[in-house]
Amino acid sequence: MKEKVLIIDDHAEIREMYETVLRMKEYDVCSEPDGLRGAMKAAEFKPDVILLDLMMPQMDGFTVLDALKNNHNLSCKIIVISNLSNQQEEERALQAGANKFLRKSDYTPDQIAEEVQKILNPNAQ
């Protein structure tokens, strides 16, 4: 069975880039354009990993993190992907339950896919 990845990001181009690369790597991928729809999709889709932007309409990434961590039916890893480069924002995201924080500008879509693989299979070389 394919591992599932949910992308929650309000930028269509970013969602499409990540979706394309992750599908090429054989992941089952879906995406949502805002935090509210993303949180609802997570409950239905039950992803193994969520790529979560912080700055979004409807519900920001921090609020989504709270909702996901309070949903005891979910046991997924969460990678925050953001253009925020503030150390405080990174610490806040990790304290709120994110497993990893990546700055979008520092990673290509292929590198994001590698980070997904690493978080799903931490013992793989």
Image (cartoon, grey):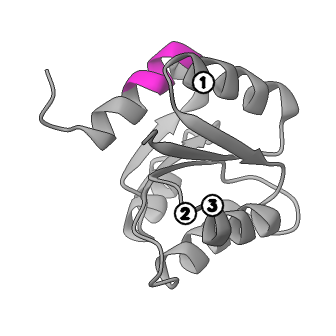
Furthest residue to the front?
1
| Quadrant of the rendering where the N terminus is positioned | top left
| Residue position for label 2 | 46
Q: Main secondary structure of the magenta part?
A: helix
Q: Badge 1: how crowded within 10 Å, few (<14), some, or many (20+)?
A: some
State the residue in front, 51 or 90: 51
Amino acid type at circle 2 is Lys
Q: Of label 2 and label 1, which has the lower sequence position?
A: 1
Q: Position of residue 52 (x, y in %)?
A: 61, 50
Q: Are marks 2 and 3 in contact (CB under 8 Å)?
A: yes
Res. 45 mark: 3
Q: Quadrant of residue 81?
A: top right
Q: Position of residue 48 (x, y in %)?
A: 44, 53
| Residue position for label 1 | 23
* Residue 22 forms part of the magenta stretch: no
Residue at image location 39% in from the left, 60% down from the top: 94
Decide if residue 6 is on the left or right side of residue 96: right
For the record, the magenta segment spans: 108-114
Residue at image location 42% in from the left, 61% down from the top: 76
State the residue in front, 55 or 52: 52
Tell how many labels: 3
